[in-house]
Image (cartoon, rainbow, N blue to C red):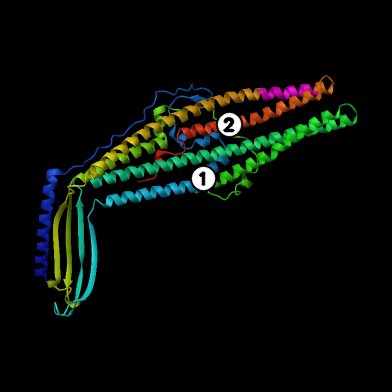
Amino acid sequence: MNKLLKRKYLSRLGDGLRTSLQCVVAVALTGCMTVGPDYQPVEPVAPEAWHTELHQGLAAGPINSATLARWWEVLDDPLLSALEARAVQGSLEVKEAQARVNEARAMRGISQAALFPTLDAGAATSKSRSSESGGSGKAEKHYAAGFDAGWEVDFFGGVRRSVEAAQANLEATEEELHGVMVSLLAEVALNYVELRTYQALLATTEANIDALQESYEINVSRHQSGLISELSVQESLRILESARATIPALESGLNAAKNRLAVLLGEVPGSLHPELAKATPIPGLPVEVVVGIPAETLRHRPDVRTSERRLAVQTARIGVATAELYPKFHLAGTLGLESISAGELFQSTSRVWGVGPSANWRVFDAGAIRQNIQAQNARQEQALIHYEATVLRALEEIENALVAYAKEQLRRESVAKASTAAERAEQLVRDQYQAGLVTFNNVLDAQRARLLLQNELAQSDGAVTVNLVRLYKAFGGGWSPTEAPTN
């Protein structure tokens, strides 16, 4: 292609492009806009203070975000902290949620791509023969190669609204990932505390079995000496075997907790048994738990944040649907080569080009577009109602967690006192039995009371810590905005 022809060719192409752009600008000046409602962020409607009375270590004040992000560290248990770190790295639920975030990010990229022109390259060759009775009857070949460009000009903002919806959907998916983190870290701690509670119950039961075994052997000796009846021996044997009968159930629960922990960490059941074999105390409580104010706590909860983002998604979709009421403008261009001879395909005479705007407007669809707009508005209303319901459920969960944490501590204090009294009462009744002042039934009653209260105390120790874990879960602890996935 010589330079003169090339300049002439490009000049014609430029004229066509200028003409098309003039049309585009003319339309833009008369009606460029973004249709549909602009999203107005909503804030959770919350009381100024918690309804629950704050006592037993609960204190009002601003929540430390760093403490909330790593709340399990207040339990001061290095093994638990190590398990939490492994769960974040190995959990399949977290990996699945992260994959959903990656999907949402890719979908946003697809929506953004619609803002830009498309360019297709193609080449084709064909061979055809006409009829001898209706034509020359000769076989002919046809060669073509070139580029096709197209661009839908987003005058009324339908594409921009779709990008807005995709961005909000990505943010909602990221908040769902945070929600998975909150649940996962709480579940690891809950199962860990359950495991330590089973170990405490086993230790208490085994110690009681040793004491009951000793009582049984004494009674057998006294019976053989004619000092007591066989009934006392059988009663002591009954309570001994009843205590032993609880061991299998406790061991089964202990193994289930270990296996559940392994799965939460993304590991094979049984893999944690060696490192969890040694019994350690149930994690203790911090001196103080700062609960913050309701509105602040609600804004940190991933479920509330997810619902708010879903509302933003649906608001943007109203604009996407509304844009269908308006014309669509396209700018298309073609630049290529066509020839019936392969040797002449790249000659200047084989050049073809075309450029120009186009518009299309659906003038009748029996109201389908307007019905779709109404449907999107109804979905936005549903999303708003769902957000408000999520806020109420969040407030309910937090209030219940505050009450449970405080009341279980009060209960534990009473159970501890009752357990101490039961131990002292059993010792006194044993002395009286040895002196012949009471029957063995009194000893049995005292032993049963002590066993029940010791088990209840171990369970209450675990329940207090469990309620603290649930409280931090209700606060949305376990993630930090600074650690959120990047867009």
Write down the residue under mark 2.
463
Foreground pick, 342 / 388: 388
Vertical arrangement, residue 444 with respect to residue 365, above or below: above
Could you say where residue 304 lies in the image, as x and y percent from the top left?
A: 39, 35
Report the residue at 52% width, 36% height from top. 73
Characterize the local packing of mark 2: few (<14), some (14-19) or many (20 or more) Cα atoms within 10 angstroms: many
- The amino acid marked with disc number 2 is Ala
Q: Report helix, strand or loop for mark 2.
A: helix
Above-or-below relation of 423 to 479: above
Residue 275 picture location, percent across and down: 62, 45
Residue shown at 42% from the left, 38% from the top: 480
Q: Position of residue 154 (x, y in %)?
A: 20, 48
Foreground: disc 1 or disc 2: 2
For residue 254, say whether it is visible.
yes
Secondary structure under badge 1? helix
Q: CA distance from mark 1 to mark 2?
A: 23 Å
Dot 1 or dot 2: first in sequence order is 1
Name the image quarter holding residue 406.
top right
Mark 1 surroundings within 10 Å by alpha-carbon count, few (fewer than 14), some (14 through 19), many (20 or more): many
